[in-house]
Image: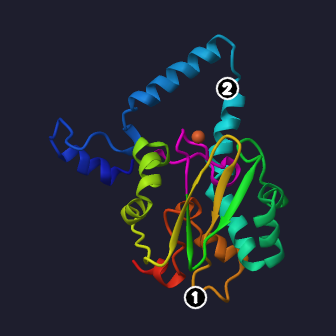
Amino acid sequence: MDPAKEEIVGSSDHDHDHDGPGPHGAPLTETQLRVKALESLLVDKGLVDPAALDALIDTYETQVGPHNGARVVARAWVNPAFKQRLLENASAAIAELGFAGRQGEDMVVIENTSKVHNLVVCTLCSCYPWPVLGLPPVWYKSAAYRSRAVFDPRGVLREFGLELPKHVEVRVWDSTAELRYLVLPERPAGTEGMSEEQLAALVTRNAMIGVARVPSPAKAARP
Ligand code: FE
């Protein structure tokens, strides 16, 4: 800590903390504590190799995630032949970009248009295309989303901030252990001159689940 800051902290005679410890001293949640306890037990007993655990965590924290799906979407936007392959055999087309693996074996990509909006849910549990989207967000696994996405998809979309015009048909797709869906969102207006890489940066996880649209760059830049 720099001395100036130390001085400010030292000058306060507060001996308790209203807001909890700062980011460096944040207490662990019950789940985090349980995970740590489990991990050290498994390592102590020689049942898991900490290096293997680190590799797994790194995979899902940094390598696998929505940035992969965003690259698939951007490629489809700029390359009609790729898009056709993607809609015909998603797993194979996605593998062309090097994204494959567990929970991505049998993929189906569904395309949003001005007339049809697709929404993905797993009503049974939390089936989700890991290689292109990473691990599912907490809300995706919630009972509320899993049931309401089916009987009130427009209401769910409204809560995500997406009000669809009446003439747009909403289709809900139920991901399962056999098939996992990925939404190919509509390419937003105002992106005509953008490169594939720039386009990929616009694509969000929620747009690929179907609870959002990809915002046009003008809107995205607004504070
Ligand atoms: Fe599931």
Q: Is residue 128 magenta?
A: yes
Q: Earlier in the sequence, mark 2 or mark 1?
A: 2
- Secondary structure, mark 2, is helix
Amino acid on which disc 2 is placed? Pro
Q: Is residue 166 magenta?
A: no
Where's the C terminus, which quadrant?
bottom left
Q: Residue at x 64, y 17 (%)?
A: 43
Above or below, comparing residue 52 to residue 199 in the picture: above
Q: Residue at x 42, y 41 (%)?
A: 143
Name the residue carrying label 2.
Answer: 50
Above or below, comparing residue 183 to residue 193 in the picture: above
- Give whichever of 134, 108 is nearer the camera: 108
Name the residue carrying label 1.
Answer: 190
- Give whichever of 44, 88 is nearer the camera: 88
Left or right side of 218 for 92: right
Above or below, comparing residue 139 to residue 49 in the picture: below
Q: Residue at x 55, y 65 (%)?
A: 207
As measured in the structure, the alpha-carbon distance from the residue carrying label 2 to the one carrying label 1 is 48 Å
